[in-house]
Image (spheres, helix red, strand yellow):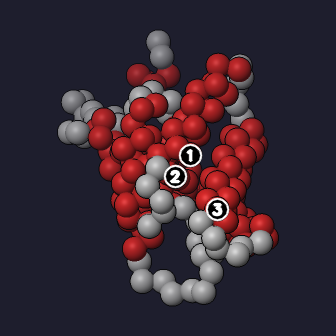
Amino acid sequence: MVRAALAQGRNIGQGPVSGAQYVPAISVLVASLLITLPIVSERGWFPDFGFLVLISWRLLRSDCWPSWWAAPMGLFNDLVSGHPIGLSVTVWTAAMLALDLADRRTMWRGYWLEWALAALLLLGNEAAEWRIAQVMGAPMPFRTILPPLLLSVLAFPIVAWIVSRIDRWRLGR
């Protein structure tokens, strides 16, 4: 008999919440809205919370949404955050495809490998934002992406834990 069936404290009939398949996408959209908080700073030091939640969901559950969902969520992030239209669409879709490739190439993934994958994806996101800003004429040295990159990489375990708690609630466990 499976150990999960022997566990105490399970309620009969308890299952996923209604609309459970949309909770991951809604949480990414809500995280993208965090950019609208009234935080005043001369330089953008805060991470892209929508992208953090997106890769946290994708690393936790690869089956919660198809890869093409990254495009509309990236479009929403572009509209909310003020990025050029198509930047998050492209970066988020490329990240989902890269994670699909990583799923096919790795037999197992531990905590450190997932953190390294997240760090590489976050570096790619920040580098793309920096490059687009340079193309548009902003005189930004590369070192300006280091604070948001460092905060994003350090915030990833916390965001991944929050996503795992949301997933646990979503599935009714």
| Percent x, y of residue 36 | 40, 74
Q: Residue at x 72, y 46 (%)?
A: 120
Q: Which mark is residue 87?
A: 2
Q: Nearer the viewer, residue 155 or 130?
A: 130
Which percent across, then down, holds residue 85? 43, 55
Mark nearest the camera among 2 and 3 is 3
Image depth: mark 1 or mark 3 in front: 3
Report which residue position mark 1 lands on: 91
Q: Residue sitting at 50 percent across and 22 percent down?
A: 3
Q: Secondary structure at mark 2?
A: helix
Instruction: Name the amino acid type tagged 2.
Output: Leu
- 1 or 3: tag closer to the N-terminus: 1
Image spot of residue 172 (x, y percent): 32, 39
Front-most of residues 126 and 3: 126
User: At x 57% / y 31%, what residue is drawn?
Assistant: 97
Looking at the rendering, which quadrant does residue 13 occupy? Answer: top left
Pick the residue in front: 167 or 83.
83
Answer whether labels 2 and 3 touch (C-beta < 8 Å): no
Q: Amino acid at mark 3?
A: Val
Numbered label attached to residue 135: 3
